[in-house]
Image (spheres, rainbow, N blue to C red):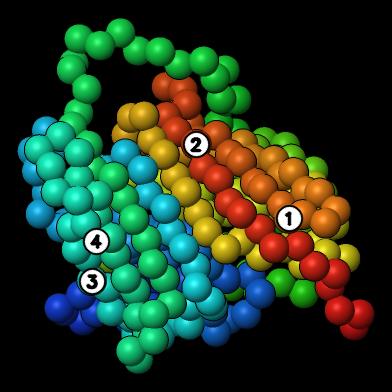
Amino acid sequence: MTEGAAAGSFYEPLGDGRFAATPATAGPWSPGFQHGGPVSGLIGRAFERHGPVPGTRIARVTVELLGPVPVAVLDISVRVVRPGRRITLLEAEMTHEGRTVVRATAWRIMEAPPHLEPVVHAPAPPPLPGTTPRFPDWPGVHVGGYLSAMEWRIVHGTFGEPGPGTTWARPRIPLVPGESDTPLVRALTLADSASGIGSQLDLSKWLIINTDLTVALHRDPAGAWLCMAASLDASPGGSALCEASLADASGVFGRAWQTLLVDERPSG
């Protein structure tokens, strides 16, 4: 079993908004820096727990990644920027040893009336494959953290190879021990993988780094398994944009976007 899969959770709570990241949070480029998925999930958890109001929900989260987030002890604080009965804007800050590494905002809005007729234009997701294969080879990548702490059932495309992709996935471990991940946390923990499964750029030649993640949900997902279909657009003299649809067994429930820096990968 890999190091990431062996961990009991992504984070250990230390009290007063402080968390110790476990090796399971490590991203593909270094065992010392976190993948954005667990980071986003922990931010989402903080938003949901800050002054919850019955009849409202977190509908959109934007995470600004100010730099690499170390696999270390982190502090999270949340404040209300714009209070309101039907609409509230929240802001979060994640720090490491006093240095801000992540800023995030979220809209908490009133739930729509239950008699609203649903409107969904996206097609149904592909069926969930019946078995979980071995994680695909990805030379030069650290797979012992987040990538192993998630269970992947890829429908088409794959990590580390050019082309859009679609995958079902679920965490093998909880975000925090002793807790069941909420629907928002599950969506955020997966969504930052969009550019990994959906990139059309050859990652052996090009370095792509997302500066942010935005996830907007028109309803909360149901079930442990979530489906993500992702693709990437890039332009010379510009940058890259990754877009993903997020679905569960009942259909699409939201979308995710990432803005990405594109640069030539240094030789060697």
Residue, disc 4: 46
Residues at marks 3 and 4 touching, judged by CB atoms closer than 8 Å:
no
User: How many angstroms separate mark 4 from mark 2 (CA)?
Assistant: 21 Å
Residue, disc 2: 255
Task: Please say whether residue 212 is visible from this viewpoint.
Answer: yes
Task: Please say whether residue 137 is visible from this viewpoint.
Answer: no
Question: Which callout, 3 or 1, points at the residue further toward the start of the chain?
Answer: 3
User: How many angstroms separate mark 3 from mark 1 (CA)?
Assistant: 31 Å
Residue, disc 1: 239
Mark 3 is surrounded, within 10 Å at the Cα level, by few (under 14), some (14 to 19) or many (20 or more) other residues, namely some
Type of amino acid under label 1 = Ser
Residues at marks 4 and 2 touching, judged by CB atoms closer than 8 Å:
no
Q: Quadrant of residue 228?
A: top right
Question: Which callout, 3 or 2, points at the residue further toward the start of the chain?
Answer: 3
Position of residue 162 relative to residue 160, above or below, is: above
Residue, disc 3: 77
User: How many angstroms separate mark 1 from mark 4 (CA)?
Assistant: 31 Å
Type of amino acid under label 4 = Ala
Mark 3 vs mark 1: in front: 1
Residues at marks 3 and 1 touching, judged by CB atoms closer than 8 Å:
no
Taking the spot 30% from the left edge, 8% from the top edge, the residue there is 117
Secondary structure under tag 3 reads: strand
User: How many angstroms separate mark 3 from mark 4 (CA)?
Assistant: 8 Å
